[in-house]
């Protein structure tokens, strides 16, 4: 029977193995299941094994530091580096991307949130100013749908103070 064990950031799946005593044990065991190369030299892009600009950038960063970089640093480079980060040259939102949210599927979600906000504003006694804050707006689709649905409610629309926080 398989026993799953967590130690720090390393995950090991072992058959009849006791719980790991330390992260070193978990790392050693996980590498027996999924060996990790000690260098980046084996990773290249293209059929002729040319080294990608991103790989050269990461290698230079490691050499400049004189040692390893953290997983967080590596992931940041792999995802957002101008030298070829995964999300730098493609649209990540919507049906063809990696992230899809309710506002991207249908405008009805944002419209209903707008109606709810206007109703709540009325229940609050119609204050002259209302801060409307959207966290992680992406393209701003939710806010655009909300504003479109409430644009005929002039008093509500003029009371809004919009904040989009990415």
Image (tube, rainbow, N blue to C red):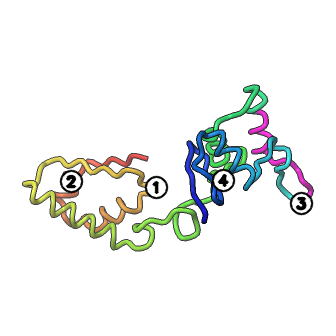
Say which label, 1 or 2, has the lower sequence index.
1
The quadrant of the image that shows the N terminus is bottom right
Residue in the picture at 85% in, 44% down? 41
Element type where label 1 sits in the image: loop
- What is the tally of numbered marks visible in this picture? 4
Residue in the picture at 78% in, 37% down? 59
Q: Please state if 75 lies on the left or on the right of 158 as rendered.
A: right
Q: CA distance from mark 1 to mark 4?
A: 17 Å
Q: Nearer the viewer, mark 3 or mark 1?
A: 3
Residue in the picture at 75% in, 32% down? 62
Q: Position of residue 100 (x, y in %)?
A: 49, 66
Q: Which residue is mark 2?
A: 158
Q: CA distance from mark 4 to mark 3?
A: 19 Å
Q: Please state if 1 lies on the left or on the right of 83 as rendered.
A: left
Residue in the picture at 33% in, 73% down? 108
Tell me the magenta residue range: 47-60
Decide which of 38, 47 is in the foreground and name it. 38
Circle 4 packing at 10 Å, graded few (<14), some (14-19), many (20+), is some
Circle 2 packing at 10 Å, graded few (<14), some (14-19), many (20+), is few
Q: Which residue is mark 3?
A: 47
Q: Nearer the viewer, mark 1 or mark 2?
A: 1
Say which label, 1 or 4, has the lower sequence index.
4
Please report contact status of discs 2 and 3: CB closer than 8 Å, yes or no: no
Q: Position of residue 3 (x, y in %)?
A: 58, 59
Element type where label 4 sits in the image: loop
Q: Position of residue 15 (x, y in %)?
A: 65, 60
Q: CA distance from mark 2 to mark 4?
A: 40 Å
Circle 1 packing at 10 Å, graded few (<14), some (14-19), many (20+), is some
Q: Which residue is mark 4?
A: 86
Q: CA distance from mark 1 to mark 2?
A: 24 Å
Q: Which residue is mark 1?
A: 138
């Amino acid at each position: 029977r398989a026993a799953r064990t967590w130690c720090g950031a390393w995950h090991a799946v072992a058959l009849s193995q006791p719980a790991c005593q330390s992260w070193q044990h978990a790392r050693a065991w996980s590498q027996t299941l999924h060996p990790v190369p000690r260098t980046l030299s084996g990773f290249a892009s293209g059929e002729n094994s040319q080294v990608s600009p991103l790989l050269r950038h990461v290698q230079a960063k490691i050499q400049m530091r004189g040692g390893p970089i953290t997983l967080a640093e590596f992931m940041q480079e792999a995802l957002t580096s101008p030298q070829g980060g995964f999300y730098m040259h493609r649209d990540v939102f919507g049906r063809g991307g990696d992230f899809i949210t309710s506002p991207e599927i249908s405008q009805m979600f944002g419209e209903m949130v707008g109606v709810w906000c206007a109703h709540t504003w009325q229940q609050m006694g119609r204050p002259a100013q209302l801060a409307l804050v959207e966290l992680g707006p992406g393209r701003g689709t939710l806010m655009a749908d909300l504003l479109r649905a409430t644009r005929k409610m002039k008093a509500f629309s003029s009371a809004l103070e919009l904040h989009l926080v990415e």
